[in-house]
Image: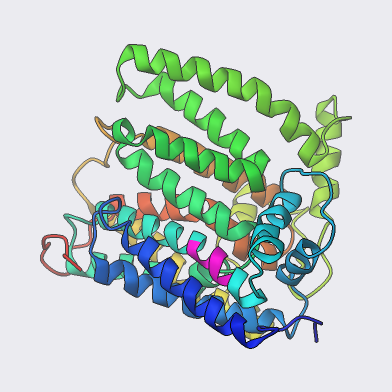
Amino acid sequence: MNIISFFDQITDIFSAIGIFIVGSLLIIQTTKLFKTTKLRVFGLYVWHSIFSLVYAYVSLTMPSDTTIYYISSLNILPEFNLGTNAVIYLTSIFTNGLGFSYLGVFLIFNIFGTIGLLAVDASLRHATIDKSNFTKFLAFIIVLLPSMNFWTSAIGKDSIAYMSTGLLLWASIDLKNNTKLIAFSFICMFLVRPHISALIVIAFTLSLFITKILSPIKRIFLIIISLVGTMYLIPITIQYVGLEEITSIDLVKDFINVRQGYNLTGGGGIDISSMSLWLKLFTYSFRPLPYEAHSFLSFLSSIDNFILLIILVLSLISGINSRQKLIPLSSYKENRWFLIIFALSVMVISSFTTSNLGISVRQKWMYMPIILYFLFLYMKIKWSDPVKISKI
């Protein structure tokens, strides 16, 4: 049992309630941004908050990074740095600065995760706006998945990274009007996972050479800014992931082999060193499956993975059976090239360096929402008549 608890004193109960109320008011303000209703955003906020409460309770009964972040924030802080230290510094604002309890800080990070959830929900509603009722139902089920809500509701990097991914996805659907939102998303990712933020800049830069959504002048300006940003980010990324002394392809291979040996202990450890590329991608994205579950949380994740597989299969089948051409990556409004380059980059790199399914079920939500967006975008199942997008 950890030395911390939900509340240290009775006032912590009222502060937690106050945080939830303030969070509700903030979340409701996003209805215009995500083109939805107050009822829908509040409902998803409550749903996500339930998982935050469950996570907070579970983290007190078993080893968890969340307790480490919280306890570390109460101590004298080290020199500011990216990644883990950034989360500790942010947590310290709410512990040392505002005196919030463990659950109170959980509810703060829950707001970050909820914003990401609302962005993903808005994106999937956009992808299925002209699709059948059945497809819309599948998209809504995805938004309610326990894995998507549980791992993104806690103190730590995952809630902030998920918010970043969700906002990147939503902003890219209307690039002309959301360049500032993309910049904000990048900053959020840079603070907690700078190596992923480097992929954001690289993918965005490459997409600007392909897409013609923006005017030539604006594209040239953004390309210059992105190239400068890439030059600045590469040294930071190299230092962050420990690649300073790697100067050859052989050393890169050795580094990957070493990374593949990390986190093999425990129920989620799995040897990926001898797997093919496609099996690594499948393992990272869709395992554990139900027959591989070794705990209750693992079983819930396996059910979610099974649902994700169903979405993948249905999208592939509908695409094969459709007589129409697939939706092109080039769009007059959406920066789909950026999304697909970024998502595939994160998926491939992560699948090569992560050998623990417990980690993959959390970190895959940095790219999985984008993959799901494309799966629903290409899905053409006609098991019910298409309807107009719901107002709820």
Q: How is the image coloured?
A: rainbow
Observer-nearest of 88 and 35: 88
Magenta residues span 106-111
Where residue 254 sits, quadrant-wise, is top right
Count of marks overlaid on the render: 0
Tell me residue 287's x, y (percent).
60, 67
- Report if residue 378 lies within the magenta region: no
Q: Is residue 374 left or right of residue 342?
A: left
Examine the residues drawn in magenta and state their main secondary structure: helix
Position of 32 relative to 133 (above/below): above
Residue 110 inside the magenta-drawn segment: yes
> Could you say where residue 165 lies in the image, as x and y percent from the top left?
49, 49
Residue furthest out toward the right:
245
Q: Position of residue 313 (x, y in %)?
A: 39, 62
Q: Is residue 314 left or right of residue 85?
A: left
Question: In front here: 134 or 99?
Answer: 99
Query: In percent of the image, x 67 and y 23: which residue is there?
Result: 232
For this view, does 91 lie left or right of residue 139? right
Looking at the rendered image, the quarter that the N terminus falls into is bottom right
Q: Is residue 27 visible?
A: yes
- Relative vertical location of residue 193 with respect to residue 289 in this rendering, above or below: above
* Picture layout, residue 104 above or below residue 256: below
329 or 13, nearer to the observer: 13
- The reply, left or right, for residue 7 in relation to residue 115 is right
Residue at 23% across / 56% down in the picture? 380
Residue at figure coordinates x 19%, y 58% from the top left: 131
Residue 282 seen from this side: no
Report the quarter where the C terminus lies: bottom left
x, y (%) of residue 217? 35, 11
Of residues 215 and 316, the one nearer the viewer is 215
